[in-house]
């Protein structure tokens, strides 16, 4: 969900003009009663409740207002230090910018102002719980700071063990994305709960700044787990670049801003180890790496250059000088997209982590969650994976969106061991 600008934590004074009484006594009495009703102060409820104990360090200051809006929030710890907080978009709460500390006491003072200018202030004091002894779920944010990503880059958070379905809404409420210029999107869970993606209905606009926070530290996740850490990152989106690979022609088309830069002959996976067909995203780039499939049905160890990962299962685009004679006519790989050494080197200077790669015409479809598969389904299907209501009216633009991509940069390395072929 999108974070709005931090609310200034100061009171707001509203000047109220004096009432002018006219007419007979009966009318004045009716008018006074009418204005008195309008001038009633707003009703305000604040959570956690006053004197609450064992509050998680992921706690927020929740607010519910009838007849007005929150105009001031001030949170301090037991030493008088002010705690910075940011409002939720729907106004339902204020989220501390950093996790609270265990076994500390905090006081929140909230003021709401009605249309008439009358105010209501509520104060609550609560104490956080000791550091949890429950095992922490391991979360990984695949969105690093100070990078330039492709226009198809989904914000991805992975979980080990996977998040159970009943806990996903609570986790999703602690995942925040802010874009400039604004491009609202939706979080969507992979079926087994091992990954959750965030993307907009359309590809990111080049030049967009994306700020992410996975505020999971101390968050209760189900009955037996807690969140492990609070992570933040801000990066930008670069130019549009995309790769289109057609098994029928054994050719890769490289496009920037929708214009063809080059066609490259390829050799894809042989029938016993076919390449996946679908919409993938470049996940990481290696100038040099080693593919090691020791322990598999077809074990091998080979050093490769200029390798770009597309799936967790080990499908890469990479230089393969040993198959240059087959590139453009015959599939010989273990599932990877083989290109010449010169073409692979050239691609490394053009592509970016977060570029879209579309493969079509092979024997098997891309499996959900095998890589960052957020674009491999329609928007209508994608939003079904959200554990929270989807904003009404949010959907793809009717106009054609250009080919996605960007130039130069990197990302955190995926965790599974490198394979390929």
Image (tube, grey):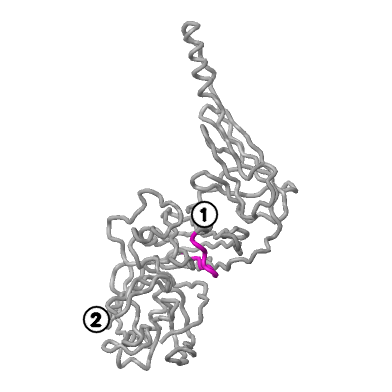
How crowded pointer 1 is (Cα within 10 Å; few <14, some 14-19, many 20+) is rated as: some
Q: Is residue 119 above or below residue 21?
A: below
Report the number of discs: 2
Q: Is residue 421 above or below residue 415?
A: below
Q: Is residue 122 above or below residue 390?
A: above
Question: Going 35% across and 78% down the picture, which residue do you hit?
Answer: 276
Which contiguous range is marked in magenta?
155-165
Q: Is residue 164 magenta?
A: yes
The residue lying toward the viewer, choosing from 174 and 398, is: 174
User: Where is residue 177 drawn, in percent x and y?
Assistant: 49, 57
User: Where is residue 329 drawn, in percent x and y?
Assistant: 26, 88
Residue of label 2: 248
Q: Secondary structure at mark 1?
A: loop
Residue most extreme to the right: 79
Q: Are marks 1 and 2 in contact (CB under 8 Å)?
A: no
The residue lying toward the viewer, choosing from 163 and 360, is: 163
Q: Quadrant of the C terminus?
A: bottom left
Q: Does 24 sit left or right of 401 as displayed?
A: right
Q: Secondary structure at mark 2?
A: loop
User: Where is residue 36 drawn, in percent x and y?
Assistant: 53, 20
Q: Is residue 19 magenta?
A: no
| Whole-number angstrom distance, CA of label 1 to CA of label 2 | 44 Å
The residue lying toward the viewer, choosing from 403 and 342, is: 403
Residue of label 1: 173
Q: Does 298 sit left or right of 138 as displayed?
A: left
């Amino acid at each position: 969900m999108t974070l709005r600008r931090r609310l200034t934590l100061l009171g707001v004074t509203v000047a109220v003009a004096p009432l002018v009484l006219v007419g007979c006594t009966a009318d004045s009495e009716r008018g006074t009663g009418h204005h008195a009703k309008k001038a009633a102060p707003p009703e305000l409820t604040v959570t956690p409740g006053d004197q609450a104990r064992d509050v998680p360090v992921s706690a927020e200051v929740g607010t519910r207002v009838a007849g007005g809006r929150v105009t001031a929030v001030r949170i301090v710890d037991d030493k008088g230090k002010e705690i910075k907080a940011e409002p939720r978009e729907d106004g339902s709460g204020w989220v501390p910018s950093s996790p609270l500390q265990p076994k500390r006491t905090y006081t929140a003072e909230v003021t709401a102002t009605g249309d008439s200018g009358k105010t209501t202030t509520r104060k609550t004091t609560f104490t956080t719980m000791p550091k949890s002894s429950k095992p922490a779920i391991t979360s990984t944010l695949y969105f690093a700071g100070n990078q330039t990503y492709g226009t198809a880059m989904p914000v991805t958070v992975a979980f080990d063990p996977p998040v159970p379905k009943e806990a996903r809404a609570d986790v999703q409420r602690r995942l925040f994305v802010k874009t400039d210029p604004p491009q609202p999107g939706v979080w969507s869970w992979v079926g087994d709960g091992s990954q959750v993606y965030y993307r907009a209905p359309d590809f990111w606009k080049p030049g967009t700044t994306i700020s992410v926070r996975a505020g999971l530290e101390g968050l209760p996740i189900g009955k037996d787990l807690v969140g492990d850490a609070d992570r933040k990152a801000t990066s930008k989106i670069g130019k549009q670049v995309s790769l289109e690979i057609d098994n029928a022609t054994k050719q890769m088309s490289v496009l920037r801003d929708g214009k063809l830069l080059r066609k490259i002959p390829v050799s894809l996976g042989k029938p016993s180890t076919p390449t996946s067909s679908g919409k993938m995203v470049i996940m990481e780039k290696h100038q040099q790496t080693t593919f090691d499939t020791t322990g598999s049905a077809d074990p091998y160890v080979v050093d490769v250059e200029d390798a770009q990962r597309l799936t967790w299962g080990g499908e890469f685009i990479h230089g393969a000088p040993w198959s240059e004679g087959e590139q453009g006519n015959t599939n010989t790989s273990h599932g990877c997209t083989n290109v010449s050494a010169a073409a692979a080197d050239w691609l490394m200077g053009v592509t970016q982590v977060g570029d879209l790669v579309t493969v079509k015409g092979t024997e098997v479809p891309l499996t959900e969650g095998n890589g960052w598969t957020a674009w491999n389904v329609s928007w209508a299907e994608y939003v079904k994976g959200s554990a929270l209501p989807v904003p009404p009216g949010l959907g793809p633009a009717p106009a054609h969106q250009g080919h996605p991509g960007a130039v130069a940069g990197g990302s955190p390395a995926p965790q599974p061991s490198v394979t390929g072929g």
